[in-house]
Amino acid sequence: MRLRRFFATLLLTAGLSTVVVGQGVAEAQGPRGREGIGLNQQSGDRVLSPEANEVSVDEMLNAELDMDLAFVDHLGNPVHLGDFFDGEHPVLVTLNYYRCPTLCNLQLNGLTRTLEQLDWVPGKEFRIVTVSIDPREGPEIASGKRANHLEALGRGEVDWNFLTGDALQVRMLAAQLGIGYAYDAEQDQYAHPAVLMFVSPEGKVARYLYGLEYEPGDVKFALMEAAEGRVGSPVDKLILSCFHYDATLGRYGPFAMGIMRLGGAIMILIVGIPLILVWRRERRRREDQHLEARA
């Protein structure tokens, strides 16, 4: 619980960038990981909107999402959340809004750069669903936002879905994900945290990654964990066994026991392969001697 409150406090700093009275936006993307969440630091005497207190993240690990929640996709078609869960592919979920002047652009741009470096493609190993938290936004603006990010990604048509919906459906999804956000009427903007959520193919929340820039390896590991081993090559899974999610850092780090296991496996290969070759050569020699004796 302390850890969750700690995350919530950090993420609140990000949300404040969109709700400060008299918006003086400074350029700061900050370092990677959670340290990069605190954006647009304001001058000391400015007053913060009370709505910012609603911005929070309460990690709902293993919670099941309601597959009947209704939205509209970027083509204007009515869809349900369950349409994006096929029992095989994990789903990366983000909550943003498409007219956001600061935080959402930074987060989605950071995610797009990460996807450029990732050797997996949305639609093959995983799927992405981005949901607007602004009920005033519709398919037209969602379609434009999607087109911009797919063009920047440069991989053609991929399975990255931009959804809109009414306030109740979006609030219900956010509550199930443990995400708190708030609308500031004076600024006509939303305060919200910057976080990626990874959901299993069956719709269970599996992992959260915080910040505005994401390591491709962290995203891949989170997707593999969410899929419970159903995606990723044997090499990927072997590498994952050497890492574990460090909640204090909000990212994956080396796991001592995993590295020891990998080292043991490599040592077995180094020692075992020559022994197998010697054994096969000796067996072949004995078979040749046996044939000569019979002749």
Image (cartoon, rainbow, N blue to C red):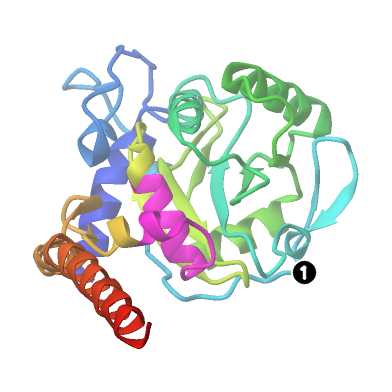
Is 59 on the left-hand or right-hand side of 276? right
In the image, farthest residue toward the front = 295
Magenta span: predominant SS is: helix
Res 201 → quadrant? bottom right
User: In x, y percent, where is residue 151?
Assistant: 66, 17
Q: Which residue is mark 1?
A: 68
Q: Quadrant of the C terminus?
A: bottom left
Q: Nearer the viewer, residue 101 or 16?
A: 101
Q: Specify whether 74 is left or right of 6.
A: right
Q: Looking at the picture, how far across and down is residue 229, in whole percent?
A: 47, 68
Which residue is at the front of the view, 240 or 179? Answer: 240
Q: Residue at x 30, y 26 (%)?
A: 39
Residue 11: in magenta span: no
Q: Amino acid at mark 1?
A: Asp
Of 46 and 120, which appears nearest the observer?
120
Which residue shows up at 33% across the image and 35% down it? Answer: 14
Examine the rendering and report whether any part of residue 202 can be seen.
yes
On the image, the x and y values in percent for residue 242 come to: 21, 60
> Residue shown at 70%/41% (left/top)?
159
User: Quadrant where the N terminus lies?
Assistant: bottom left
Residue range of the region highlighted in magenta in the rendering: 218-237
Res 56 visible: no
Q: Nearer the viewer, residue 228 or 81?
A: 228
Residue pictured at 80% horizontal, 43% vertical: 73
Label 1 crowding class (10 Å Cα cut-off): few <14, some 14-19, many 20+? few
